[in-house]
Amino acid sequence: MRKLGVIGGSGVYAVEGLADTRTRAVDTPWGMPSDALTEGAVDGVEVAFLPRHGRGHVHSPSEVPFRANVAALKMAGCTDVLAVSAVGSFREEMAPGHFVAVDQFVDRTKGRARSFFGTGCVAHVSLAHPTCARLSALAAGAAREAGATVHDAGTYLAMEGPAFSTVAESRLYRSWGCDVIGMTNMPEAALCREAEMCYAALAMVTDYDSWHPEHDTVDIAAIVATLGGNAARARATVAAMPARLADDGPCPHGCDRALEHAVMTKPEARDPALVDRLRAVAGRVL
């Protein structure tokens, strides 16, 4: 049985249509997540919702407990994770109000813990394709059904926050071929891969960052207004996802088998204490 985990970013603080809801605090080996999980069912499919910044938006992008968040969803039995987040756009055609099903990342964050593994148990997963094409296509379809204009692919530049880009940075990232910019989807995507969960990132465009000659300053008031317009479509998208997952079989892209040959440390050389922690996310191979 598949279970959908939903990570709600700015503007998305709940899942509509959840039946038999319950709230559960999950204490992980990496500490407490951003908030308690809200669990329930939509169209007969189990769903767990986690607000990335916490209810009331209390966690700065750089201070989100990413490992605890992903571990909590894994420990709750999630097989698939849909992450919704607000982004700026580097492309005219990716206008405010549009959605982008992200398929690539450039990670410019600093100082964030990027892996569950480390000294005592080393693993290397492939991030060549950091999002799940199957789950991303389902999310894009659900967003279109909700009335959104959707771009089926895009490269997300993950930056450190909380300040927005300078004009020089914005122009540089645009020249690199990046399409959107945000502060939260990495290392989230990498951690979901290590935890063998399918991951899709649905980015909601709120502004043109600072490269655009007619929009060269990111205006918080305008962002909040656009977020308000996007939020209803985002909630409808999330509500439509469980039905699309219901009859879906194992991941054809191997997201659920990402650790198959990834653990490099020989069993006799592994740190028992680290292995004990890792069982929460990597028990299948340990």
Image: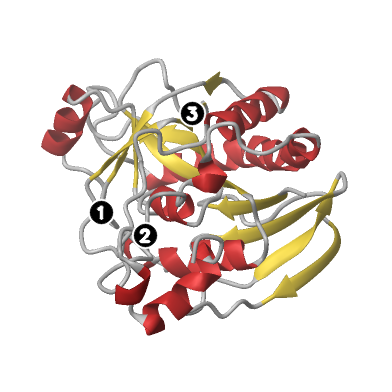
Position of 233 with respect to 256 (left or right) is right
How far apart, in angstroms, are the residues tagged by discs 2 and 3?
20 Å
> Which is more N-terminal, label 3 or label 2?
2
Q: Position of residue 212 (x, y in %)?
A: 25, 24
Residue 188 visible in the current orientation = yes
How far apart, in angstroms, are the residues tagged by discs 1 and 3?
20 Å
Q: Position of residue 171 (x, y in %)?
A: 16, 28
Residue at point 47%, 79% (across, down) = 276
Mark 3 residue element? strand
The numbered mark at residue 217 is: none
10 Å crowding of disc 2: few (<14), some (14-19), many (20+) = some
Residue type at numbered disc 1:
Glu
Residue 199 visible in the current orientation = no
How far apart, in angstroms, are the residues tagged by discs 1 and 2?
7 Å
The numbered mark at residue 160 is: 1
Q: What residue did someone put label 3 on?
A: 100
Do labels 1 and 2 touch, CB within 8 Å? Answer: yes
Question: For the view shown, which residue lies furthest in the front direction?
Answer: 268
Position of 211 with respect to 12 (left or right) is left
> Which is more N-terminal, label 2 or label 1?
2
Q: Position of residue 79 (x, y in %)?
A: 64, 51
Residue at point 26%, 48% (across, down) = 159
Residue type at numbered disc 2:
Pro
Residue type at numbered disc 3:
Val
Q: Position of residue 87 (x, y in %)?
A: 41, 39
Residue at point 69%, 29% (across, down) = 142
Q: What residue did someone put label 2 on?
A: 61
